[in-house]
Amino acid sequence: MFRRPLKTPKEVNEENPFLLSFSDLMAGLLVIFILALVVSMIELQKRKAELEKEKDKIKVTLAELVGSLEEIQNVQDSIASSLEGVGQRERSLTAMLEGIQLDLKEKGVAVVVAENGSVLRIPEQGLNFALGKYEIPTEFTSSATAIGKALAHALEQEVNRRMLDTVFIEGHTDAVQNSREMGNWGLSTYRAISLWNFWTTKPGQLAAMKDLTTIPAEPTDQGRPLISVSGYAETRSTHPPDIAGNLPPDRPEDRRIDIRFTLAASEKRKLQKLQDNLKTMKEKTDTLIQKLREADNAP
């Protein structure tokens, strides 16, 4: 018997269009993801390199800052040392004047250490200048001699002269107007000159005081005469003026001699140089701090 062959289902070899589109999409997304990852890694490496560079810059800046701060600290230490030197000289000066005062006290002559230990004051009763006069009364020449000897003894010592710049013999008057030439200004100056001449010229027992010179800090500098004279009329009264700004005219205690001691300026010059260095270091440090701030604020 003839049989017709059975028909088998036709095989489908064609791909599903939907599945093809989905796989293409996933493949594309994967490529995009990989590209994005690669780009991100590149950016990260780039940023890392930039950060490393910034880090190195910060390290350099920090090192410079530390160096600058160390320099500032050294300058500050030098300033502190110099100030201590000035303070030590001031204390030594005060001790010298107190020594002169004690020496004179033992001889029955009263002087006053005034103005923070920088002035040896010979009060009115020490020389007893008469109103309008500059001559040293005969009965007070022994006091004048004792004062001169004590001063000369102190100034002959090199350790004392080394710390001094000038010793001023200052004359003063009361507020009574004087009819002499140059008025009270002349009178006060003549009083200082009178005492200086008494010591060094007439009778001149202490003429060697003329040869006293300063001892400069630098070996190449020349010493200068140590003692000078000056006059201040009534401008430096021992008492303040009244409310109206006037001084009582006849004030005997203002008819006096002050011996003023000024310290050598070597520390002052050194301090000025150190202050200039400190200013330079501060400017340098400010610049470095600004660099650090800019690096900290960088994106």
Image (tube, helix red, strand yellow):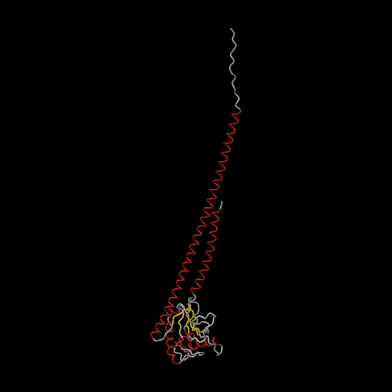
Question: Which residue reaches farthest top?
Answer: 1
Q: Is residue 39 above or below residue 165?
A: above
Q: Residue 18, position in %: x, y?
A: 60, 29
Question: Which residue reaches farthest bottom?
Answer: 138
Question: Which residue reaches farthest left?
Answer: 106
* The quarter of the displayed image where residue 81 is located: bottom left
Q: Residue 235, position in %: x, y?
A: 53, 82
Q: Which of 173 and 188 is in front in this view?
A: 173
Q: Residue 295, position in %: x, y?
A: 54, 54
Q: Which of 74 and 258 is in front in this view?
A: 258
Q: Residue 193, position in %: x, y?
A: 50, 87
Q: In which quarter of the image is the N terminus?
A: top right
Figure disc tally: 0
Q: In this view, does 72 lie above or below 20?
A: below
